[in-house]
Amino acid sequence: SAEMNNKNGLFEYGKALLTGEHIPQDTDSAVKLLEKAVKLKNSNAKRFLALEYISGEHLEQDFEKGIALLTECADSGDVIASYRLGKIYLQGEIMPQNLDKAEKYLLLAEDSEYTQYALAKLYLQEEKYDIQKAVDYFENGADKNHWASYQLGRIYLFGAKDIERDKEKAIEWFTKSANDGNEYAQDLLENMERYENAVLANTIFGLFANLSRCIEDDYTQKYKLVRRTVDSRLRRMISQKKLSLGIKEEQAQNYE
């Protein structure tokens, strides 16, 4: 089919040649076939090339070229490309963080539970802060994403600007997350009292937070520090458990 200029055949054969899946790897021929498929308007081929240039796994890494191709895909209505591009701008790792662009592209793909999770994280950022939107998106994705229910548990355990602490709701969401396989939620449930004490100590400080903008800013930083400390303790506890069981530690996906 590749010889007949079938754009899907060109894409599949080019992909196989690039990855070396089932056939010998031939990068130059692969790129030619994939670019030909792109010219025939195969969006999968364009997205695939974009992500390969970004990752550098099988091609020489070229962020600028990859982002340009991915943007063309997203602007043409490719939902997967929109999600990936939105995540790139949200994370700010390979490109400078741009929350306006992150919001734009994630909203183009908001029906996915993983996009909803990313949107929720977006609305927890100071520049785009909207806790109700964040909660709504976390709730929308919670049935299929145990990190969403975990984040809801955190919000209700620690409280947030415009949302008061609610231990009952926190336990409810942590329990759902744990039942769905989230070990961080399970460990937090088992050690709830320890983390509540950390929150209480921070809340006492928080009683004075409204005295001035300066104090409020300092409180925000201390509050974030408490949350980071809790997560750090959880990761350490889980690592120790895995080591005692002889289980190799694996990096959790960036849903934390």
Image (tube, rainbow, N blue to C red):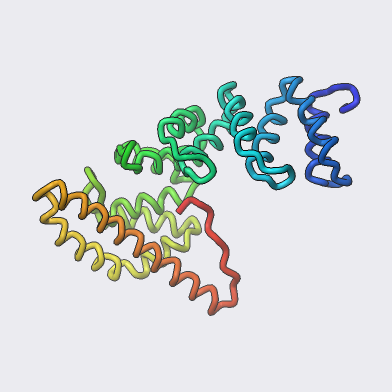
Q: Quadrant of residue 44?
A: top right
Q: Viewed as shown, does residue 114 lie left or right of 35?
A: left
Report x, y in % for residue 162.
22, 43
Report x, y in % for residue 42.
72, 24
| Quarter of the picture holding the C terminus | bottom left
Q: Is residue 61 above or below residue 68?
A: below
Q: Viewed as shown, does residue 204 lie left or right of 195?
A: left
State the residue at coordinates (54%, 43%). Answer: 94
The image shows a total of numbered marks equal to 0
Report x, y in % for residue 33.
82, 30
State the residue at coordinates (31%, 42%). Answer: 126
| Quarter of the picture holding the N terminus | top right
State the residue in front, 173 or 30.
30
Report x, y in % for residue 254.
50, 51
State the residue at coordinates (29%, 52%). Answer: 156
Q: Viewed as shown, does residue 91 lie left or right of 63?
A: left
Residue extending farthest to the right is: 3
Q: Viewed as shown, does residue 57 lie left or right of 88?
A: right
State the residue in front, 221 or 186.
221
Q: Is residue 225 above or below residue 9?
A: below
